[in-house]
Amino acid sequence: MTKIFHYINFALIFLFLVGICILEEVIVSGSLKAVQNDVLAIEQVLQEKDALLDSEIIIMVDNLEYTWAKNESKMCYMVNHKSIQEIGVEIARLKGCIVIDNIDDFRISLEHLSLYCHSYLHFMGASIHNVL
């Protein structure tokens, strides 16, 4: 009879760990995809503009910064903060490029953000290694 309870406890612990990994995957993927979507939207608007000192671009970058700050605070519980700090640094660069109206560096920072999110989505996903 006690062996049955051990098996039940083991199964419950395993299911709990799998649930945590799935929750981690949903939050991390959702946060990174939100940044990717914001970057894509900024890139599309930027194609129509010839200067960064535009209220639409400024608002979009501010929204990106706000969204990232909100999502980063959730992600810090699940991933190493040093692994995701580059995104915050690039967002700060975007804001600096707007101030000096440097559209070339702005585009490069957008590319970096897109690259970081794309690569992080690949290695921060849930895996059986996380469960074990």
Image (tube, helix red, strand yellow):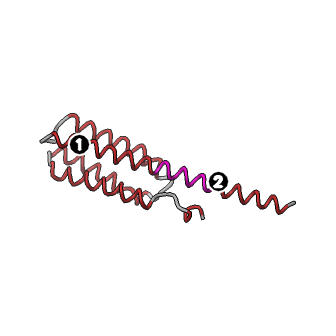
Outermost residue toward the right in this view? 1
Q: Which of the two discs, 1 and 2, labels the residue nearer the N terminus?
A: 2
Count of numbered labels shown in the rendering: 2
Magenta stretch: includes residue 24: yes
Residue 59 drawn at (x, y percent): 26, 36
Toward the viewer: 113 or 121? 121
Amino acid type at circle 1 is Gln
Residue 92 drawn at (x, y percent): 28, 49
Density class for disc 2 (Cα within 10 Å; few <14, some 14-19, many ≥20) is few
Residue 97 drawn at (x, y percent): 19, 48
Query: Residue at label 1?
Result: 44
Query: Residue at label 2?
Result: 16
Q: Is residue 19 left or right of residue 46?
A: right
Residue bounds of the magenta highlight: 16-28
* Residue 58 sits in quarter: top left
Find the distance from the CA under tag 1 to the CA under tag 2. 42 Å
Q: Is residue 97 left or right of residue 14?
A: left
Q: Is residue 88 left or right of residue 28?
A: left
Callout 1 secondary element: helix
Residue at position x 33%, y 51% in the image: 88
